[in-house]
Image (spheres, rainbow, N blue to C red):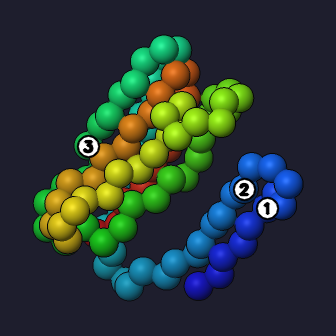
Amino acid sequence: MHSGAIGAHGPSVRATCVDFPEGTQFTSGTVTAAAGETRTEVIASGPGIKACALVSIIGAFTQHSWTDGVLINEPSTLDGTWTMTVTNGKSAKWACAK
């Protein structure tokens, strides 16, 4: 596993590479919100979900705000539902492994 950060004096980006066992199934998709809109969509649910990750983001990130961007919401239980919330003219691609 390898992690790295970019941007000591501004926005920070972190990435982690993870190996999955043979036979792991992957799903992916995109969630988009129009300007002024907030959308939350289910990206994975049910038993066996191991991980979901943000793949890419598109949009103007000009506000220092937790509520103006993209957020993956992890489940509170192992077999719970993963959702993604996208706001204010942003678009995000996601991928999940199970």
Q: Which residue is mark 1?
A: 6
- Quarter of the figure with residue 23: bottom left
Vertical relation: 27 (above or below) 4: above
Is 32 placed left or right of 24 in the picture? right
Residue 22 appears in the figure? yes
How far apart in space, not on screen, are marks 1 and 3 (Cα)? 30 Å
Q: Which residue is mark 2?
A: 12
Identify residue type, mark 1: Ile
- Which SS class for mark 3? strand
Is 33 placed left or right of 83 in the picture? right
Answer yes or no: do the residues labelled 1 and 3 have beta carbons within 8 Å?
A: no
Identify which residue is drawn at 74% across, 67% down: 5
Identify which residue is drawn at 42% across, 80% down: 20
- What is the crowding at mark 1: few (fewer than 14 residues within 10 Å), some, or many (at least 20)? few
- Which SS class for mark 2? loop
Is 15 placed left or right of 77 in the picture? right
What x and y, as percent, mark residue 38? 40, 24
Residue 92 appears in the figure? no
Identify which residue is drawn at 82% across, 57% down: 7
Identify residue type, mark 3: Val
Identify residue type, mark 2: Ser
Answer yes or no: do the residues labelled 1 and 2 have beta carbons within 8 Å?
A: yes
- Quarter of the figure with residue 64: top right
Q: Which residue is mark 3?
A: 42
Vertical relation: 23 (above or below) 29: below
Q: Nearer the viewer, residue 93 or 77?
A: 77
